[in-house]
Image (cartoon, helix red, strand yellow):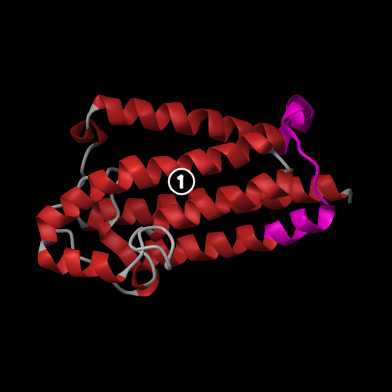
Amino acid sequence: MELALLLRLLVLILFGSTFLISGLYRKRARIEKEIIERKEEGWLAFIMRMVAAVPLFLMILMNIFFPEWVVWSKFDLPDWISLISVILALVSVIWLWWVFHTIGGNISETVLTKESHELVTSGPYRLVRHPLYSGALFFLFSISLIFKDWVIFFYTLAGLVAFRLLVIPAEEEQLLEAFGEDYECYQSQTGAIFPWLR
């Protein structure tokens, strides 16, 4: 099998796995705890999420199914980097499973905190406060290297900035309101996205 085709197939499996894991755990969370509707977060947040997510997903899907449509977005890398990046993407999927498994019913579709939310500081949350964002960004970074695609790479960097400057402050405002000093202490001991950056 041609290497490019094999890589596309592997990415399809890994990409599908992230949706399967997320979907199953989110469905379980909706049954176990209350649901926060996206409309409670406001239409601006929903529109911003769609403006960011839809083109990114389309770009990934075009790389998988119609690579000839996105030849303009390629940069040059040795094939061995793409192969190693498949392993990094697999590690990201396992990491995301660990995150969902650890947070359980606390997972939310929004930055808002559920009334029955519990402060989780175990598992991957022991290492970073927002491991779901870390895992998603690492997964996208891996895919950008697998496909050698500068658009997906740019989205990864833009996502890092957006999470750090917009999403995390909004989410942590809710968490500080809900957990007070306990969350302040957790913040002081744990990095937001990377373990070594407080």
Q: Nearer the viewer, residue 38 or 121?
A: 121
On screen, residue 116 above or below 77: below
Q: Is 180 left or right of 118, judged from the image as shown?
A: left
On screen, residue 194 above or below 38: below
Whether residue 65 is in magenta: the answer is yes
Whether residue 44 is in magenta: the answer is no
**Rendered location of residue 185, percent (x, y):** 19, 70
Q: What is the magenta range? A: 64-86
Screen quadrant of the C terminus: bottom left
Q: Give the residue at x 42% y 52%.
A: 133
Which residue bears the numbered disc 1? 160
Residue 120: tell me if it is visible. Answer: no
On screen, residue 181 above or below 167: below
Q: Give the residue at x 26% y 59%.
A: 105
Q: Quadrant of residue 29?
A: bottom left
Residue 100: tell me if it is visible. Answer: yes
Q: In which quarter of the image is residue 32?
A: bottom left
**Rendered location of residue 173, percent (x, y):** 18, 49
Question: How many badges with numbers are in the image?
Answer: 1
Dominant secondary structure, magenta: helix
**Rendered location of residue 64, percent (x, y):** 70, 38
Q: Look at label 1 and name its amino acid.
A: Leu
Q: Give the residue at x 55% y 35%.
A: 57
Q: Give the residue at x 33% y 62%.
A: 129
Q: Is 133 left or right of 108, judged from the image as shown?
A: right
Label 1: state its secondary structure: helix
